[in-house]
Amino acid sequence: MKLETNYVQKQVVLQPWKANLFACVCLLPFVPAALLFYQKAVTFSVSLSDIGLFFVVVLGGIIVHEAVHGVGFMLSRQVATSDIRFGVMWRKLVVYACCLKPISVGSYRLAVALPALLLGVLPFFLAYFFQSLFWYVWSIVMLIGSFGDFYILWTLRSFSKQTRIADSPDSIGYVAYLPESKA
């Protein structure tokens, strides 16, 4: 991809196992939160149809999650819909939305964080406000599904605001376009 000024490309390849390890560590605060929010006994029953419905709803949530990434890329106003791709890497069981055109690192961070905020954090507060077990479980499932995004955000922390980011079309990761330093 050719940019209007001089940039140096840095390929960043992400390891799914690191995202999974990161997920395990990040899940720890939700156990005390659940104990705090639901101090009284919670009872419920689950049928086979409930389990089936749960998986259908989660599958829908995964699709919406990736669509929200696409909306986040579009909010940057730096890309066209033709610059965004959706798909599944079946061998690694990774569902993705990727932006093939470099955008500012701030816009990229927003697009990466948006599903966790809208589908995970917001329902978490709804669960607390309404004392809803459904919204609590939904928020946890969606936050677990966002741990790959949190891992991406973690890897972006060292890039300056002049950096531009484009998803890698060939691997799990992205290309950082760093402005050449004027030495």
Image: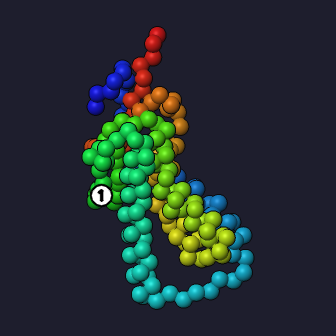
* Residue 66 appears left or right of 116: left
Residue 14 appears anywhere in the view: no
Query: Can you give x and y, in whole percent of width and height, for residue 154 in the image?
Result: 52, 43
Between 113 and 72, the residue placed more toward the observer is: 72
Q: Quadrant of residue 76?
A: top left
Number of callouts: 1
Q: Residue placed farthest to the top in the image?
A: 183
Q: Is residue 89 above or below residue 35?
A: above
Query: Can you give x and y, in whole percent of width and height, for residue 64 in the image?
Result: 40, 63
Please give the name of the residue rendered at 37% of the width and 63% of the height, measured from the top-left corner: 63
State which quarter of the image contains the N terminus: top left
* Secondary structure category for the residue under label 1: strand
Please give the name of the residue rendered at 42% of the width and 56% of the height, measured from the top-left corner: 68
Disc 1 packing (10 Å; few <14; some 14–19; many ≥20): few
Between 127 and 147, the residue placed more toward the observer is: 127
What residue would you read off at disc 1? 88
Please give the name of the residue rendered at 52% of the width and 52% of the height, measured from the top-left corner: 22
Query: Can you give x and y, in whole percent of width and height, for residue 147 in the image?
Result: 49, 55
Please give the name of the residue rendered at 63% of the width and 65% of the height, measured from the top-left corner: 125
Q: Quadrant of residue 3?
A: top left
Q: Is residue 11 above or below residue 127?
A: above
Q: Is residue 174 above or below residue 124?
A: above
Amino acid type at mark 1: Val
Structure colour scheme: rainbow
* Residue 30 appears left or right of 103: right
